[in-house]
Image: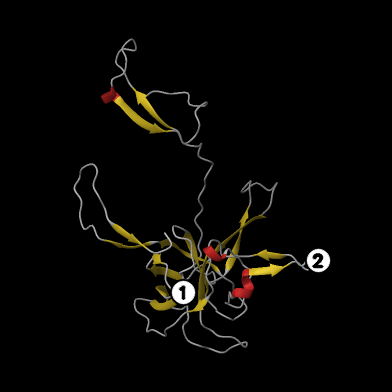
């Protein structure tokens, strides 16, 4: 192993590294290897918690006591939250741009609902939508066109909440399935034809629907694909192999 000073190299640069047995000799091409200079890795830590008693569909604050068992400092709010999702699986995770994109959602047995239960004046159906970020601006399980922007009272300026090319309107879960292996599977249908191709979006879910206790939280990551079909079935392990594909009309 050898140490190299790369402090003056731009992170992300792709460089050629040559190792020569005799420093007086020049490098030959076969001995050269490509390496990439990366950013320094920030300090990362992990904690393990017993979340079995937490409420599904709720957000919880992440609190930290920096000095641990010492009594000099106490617990404090870090400003970050975690969402307790009852969603176990989303299929497909690669979505087409369509007027009717069907998504299957598998939940823990008691976390999601597709049945209309009228309590507190609202529907008990779980709901979902796609967005870049699941903002906690709606507690009634609905994101409609009026919720995409809001108006500042002082200046009457209209401020966007969601970028329409990176968000959908909300829809309710459909189905009242029988539990299998302590899970239930539901279905949602979203209009995705206007979404930006190539974007990764969050599936935001509000498990209690129009009940006002919970709000939307991130449950899965999906990718918006513009590729409708790939007609090439196989290629060889060689250079300059051709793959034919069909994209939708906007790409």
Taking depth in this image into account, of 217 and 227 the one nearest to the observer is 227
User: Does residue 123 appear in this view?
Assistant: yes
Taking depth in this image into account, of 65 and 27 the one nearest to the observer is 27
- Who's the residue at 65% across and 46% down the image? 70
Q: Is residue 77 left or right of residue 53?
A: right
Q: Of callouts 1 and 2, which one flags the residue occurring earlier in the amino acid sequence? A: 2
Above or below, 185 against 41 in this view is below
Taking depth in this image into account, of 237 and 106 the one nearest to the observer is 237
In the picture, the quarter occupied by the N terminus is: top left
Residue 3, quarter of picture: top left
Above or below, 50 against 171 in this view is above
Which residue is disc 2 drawn over?
A: 154
The count of marks equals 2
- Residue 47: where, in percent of width, then height? 51, 53
The answer to whether the residue labelled 1 contacts the one labelled 2, judged by CB atoms less than 8 Å apart, is no
- Residue 105: where, in percent of width, then height? 41, 73
- Who's the residue at 51% across and 71% down the image? 129
Above or below, 24 against 34 in this view is above
Assess disc 2: are there few (<14), some (14-19) or many (≥20) residues with their C-alpha within 10 Å of its C-alpha. Answer: few
- Residue 49: where, in percent of width, then height? 51, 59
Q: Is residue 60 left or right of residue 192?
A: right
Q: Is residue 240 left or right of residue 249?
A: left
- Who's the residue at 31% across and 12% down the image? 25
Q: Secondary structure at mark 2?
A: loop
In the picture, the quarter occupied by the C terminus is: bottom left
In the drawing, what numbered circle is on residue 46?
A: none
Which residue is disc 1 drawn over?
A: 190
Assess disc 1: are there few (<14), some (14-19) or many (≥20) residues with their C-alpha within 10 Å of its C-alpha. Answer: many
Taking depth in this image into account, of 182 and 185 the one nearest to the observer is 185
């Amino acid at each position: 192993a050898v140490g190299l000073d790369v402090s003056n190299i731009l992170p992300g640069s792709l460089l050629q590294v040559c190792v020569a047995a005799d420093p007086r000799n020049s490098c030959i091409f076969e001995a050269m290897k490509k390496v990439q200079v990366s950013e320094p890795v920030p300090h990362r830590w992990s904690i393990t918690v017993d979340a079995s008693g937490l409420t599904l569909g709720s957000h919880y604050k992440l609190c930290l006591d920096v000095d641990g068992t010492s009594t000099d400092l106490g617990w404090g709010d870090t400003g970050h939250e975690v969402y307790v999702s009852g969603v176990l699986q989303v299929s497909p995770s690669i979505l087409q741009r369509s007027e009717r994109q069907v998504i299957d959602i598998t939940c823990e047995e008691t976390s999601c609902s597709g049945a209309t239960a009228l309590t507190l004046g609202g529907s008990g159906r779980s709901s979902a939508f796609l967005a870049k970020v699941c903002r906690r601006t709606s507690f009634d399980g609905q994101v409609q066109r009026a919720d995409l922007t809001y108006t500042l009272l002082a200046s009457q300026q209209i401020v966007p909440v969601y970028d329409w090319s990176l968000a959908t309107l909300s829809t309710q879960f459909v189905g009242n399935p029988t539990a299998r292996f302590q899970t239930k599977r539901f279905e949602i249908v979203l209009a995705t034809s206007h979404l930006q191709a190539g974007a990764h979006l969050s599936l935001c879910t509000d498990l209690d629907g129009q009940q006002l206790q919970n709000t939307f939280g991130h449950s899965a990551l999906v990718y918006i694909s513009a590729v409708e079909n790939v007609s090439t079935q196989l290629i060889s392990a060689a250079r300059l192999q051709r793959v034919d594909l069909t994209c939708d009309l906007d790409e």
